[in-house]
Amino acid sequence: MHTSQQEFAAGHYAPRAQDYVTSEVHSSGEDLDLIEAVLHGQGSARVLDLGCGGGHASYRAAPHVAEVVACDVTARMLEVVAATAAERGLANIAVHQAAAENLPFPDASFDVVLCRFTAHHWQNMEAGLRQARRVSKPGGRGVFIDTITPADRVLDTHLQAIDLLRDASHVRNYSVAEWIGSLARSGFAIEGITMRRMRMEFASWTARTRTPADHAKAILSLQAGAPAIVREHFAVAEDGSFDLAAATFLVRAA
């Protein structure tokens, strides 16, 4: 029996680790290009990839900095990241197992904190952000990237429902306003926000998390019965594929 969200998520993602290394959605995107731009000229920097998942932010960051610490709650995910880093000759990537809400690093340990597609799994998102700020050096940079829920409650409820059916470790997608408030309360000054839309191809979206067949069927049922505002906003296709928004928050440790 898993006693916390962190343990549940770790157990849930252990058998799915390799799928996240090969995922096209996770291994590409303008947000990864932005991470490289932020790190340009920071050859001496120490970087934390918080909730590293398949390690894609780490792989893009490593050639530009002195060290990357890839941190995740799932031990198997870290094994796959370490192996992939070795295959790619990225010897400056170290892995460390920890939950975002309880980081084992000293205060002001990192010049840059990266956090990509993970906060929606955290048991306490704001506690994780406070930890990210604690381990950031004053004035340090941060890049926080995650899927975003619409402010409209009808749209929000639909997205949370299908995400939970797809992935039992899902906690919550947050709105841009919720992110802005949480980052500010945690001690980060926001310097820029970039939005993008990603097309979620239903078959690969559910295969990546090994969604049970009855859950996938329930998602399709929810989409089919959804009001027009939902189907139009998410551009829901007949096969269940849909659009999902993601935001990149460029911040500085205040």
Image: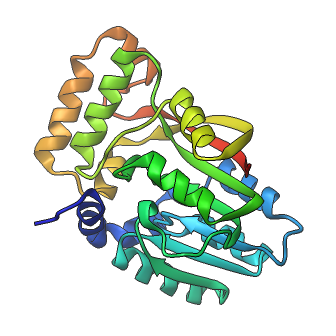
Where does the image place residue 15, in percent across and percent down from the top left?
27, 71
Q: Residue furthest right?
A: 41
Residue under the point 15% across and 51% down: 212
- The reply, left or right, for residue 254 in relation to residue 7 is right
Q: Nearer the viewer, residue 19 or 57?
A: 57
Q: Is residue 132 above or below residue 232?
A: below
- The reply, left or right, for residue 41 in relation to residue 188 is right
Q: Nearer the viewer, residue 218 or 238?
A: 218
Q: Looking at the rendering, which quadrant does residue 28 occupy?
A: bottom right
Q: Looking at the rendering, which quadrant does residue 35 occupy?
A: bottom right
Locate the N terminus by quadrant: bottom left
- The reply, left or right, for residue 9 in relation to residue 114 is left
* Total marks in image: 0
Where does the image place residue 31, in percent across and percent down from the top left?
66, 50
Residue under the point 75% across and 77% down: 63
Where does the image place residue 99, in percent across and percent down from the top left?
40, 66
**Is residue 197 visible from the viewing direction of this image?**
no
Q: Residue furthest top?
A: 228
Residue under the point 57% across and 84% down: 94
Residue under the point 58% across and 48% down: 145
Q: Is residue 143 above or below residue 9?
A: above
Where does the image place residue 41, in percent across and percent down from the top left?
89, 68
Q: Is residue 178 above or below residue 83?
A: above
**Is residue 10 visible from the viewing direction of this image?**
yes
Q: Looking at the rendering, which quadrant does residue 13 occupy?
A: bottom left
